[in-house]
Image: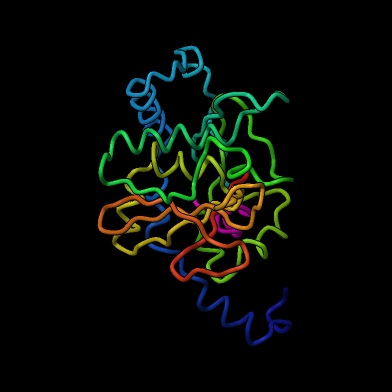
Amino acid sequence: MKWNEMTPVNWLGRLFPPKKPEFTEHVILPIEEQIKAWRRANKKMNWDIGEKEFEGIDSPPSLTDSDLEQGFVGIALFYGFGDDSAGHADSVLSGKMAWDYACKILKNRAWQSPHIDFDKPDSFRLRPGARPRPRGFYFGKIQTGERFQRMTVSEVRRYFNSVTGCGPEGLQLLCITHTHIPDMMSERKMPFMILADYDVAPHGYNDFFDTLQIFSSNRILGLGIGNVDQNYPGFGIPTVRF
């Protein structure tokens, strides 16, 4: 675009480019630190992730200019547990394992809504149409929720294509590899998170109209639910590209 073709909005945008949140350079830890966190959790929970799998972790991808423009702030390391009988990970189990670890570490500083039951398929699932997660270690590019704070889950899901909502990734991020993020949430330096790739039926019977929310207040990590058609102030919808 030539200078004389610029609109007033474009001109102001060049003079005053959007300011990135101050935390984005530090919120996502180096992969080496994330691997250490996975090793600690694996040992604590006896998950039997073998040394061969750790040694087989490849170099992480890089964020492109397009990724940065879309709000992605870093690369995180995830793990797909179990098998969905189609050669992919069991995404519900992958999230449950992370939450179990948090409950063991935090003890009375973890709270879970009684309407969440990872073990009942008619109450909790990966949403239909969500991308299947790979088994074993995999990398994901993370947008931590700031981009989608004024939209409902139903609205944001319409844009999912090359990106998708967080499911097990959100739980593994906050419970295993980036346990400083809940502290940032408690200090209101980051929005709480809605994990848009999970569906919750609070009363069972496959009546899915809620999704999973994870938040932290007064150093207590909470797992709650919220309606997919409602906006919740203070919450953002993180996305992942893998």
Q: How is the image coloured?
A: rainbow
55 over 229 or under it: above or below: above
Q: Residue at x 30, y 53 (%)?
A: 183
Q: Nearer the viewer, residue 183 or 102?
A: 102
Q: Residue at x 63, y 29 (%)?
A: 134
From the top left corner, tell me how far across and down residue 237 is, in percent.
54, 58
From the top left corner, tell me how far across and down residue 207 is, in percent.
66, 52
Q: Is residue 240 left or right of residue 178?
A: right
Reply yes or no: does residue 111 show up in magenta: no
138 over 160 or under it: above or below: above
> In the picture, residue 132 is in which quadrant?
top right
Q: Nearer the viewer, residue 12 or 191?
A: 191
185 over 162 or under it: above or below: below
> In the picture, residue 37 is in which quadrant?
top left
Where the N terminus falls, by quadrant? Answer: bottom right
Q: Magenta region: which residues?
A: 65-74
Q: Is residue 100 left or right of residue 52?
A: left
Q: Tell how many labels.
A: 0
Reply yes or no: does residue 72 show up in magenta: yes
Q: Nearer the viewer, residue 224 or 53?
A: 224
Where the C terminus falls, by quadrant? Answer: top right
Q: Residue at x 56, y 36 (%)?
A: 92
Q: Residue at x 46, y 71 (%)?
A: 233
From the top left corner, tell me how far across and down residue 51 is, in percent.
44, 13
From the top left corner, tell me how far across and down residue 87 is, in percent.
70, 23
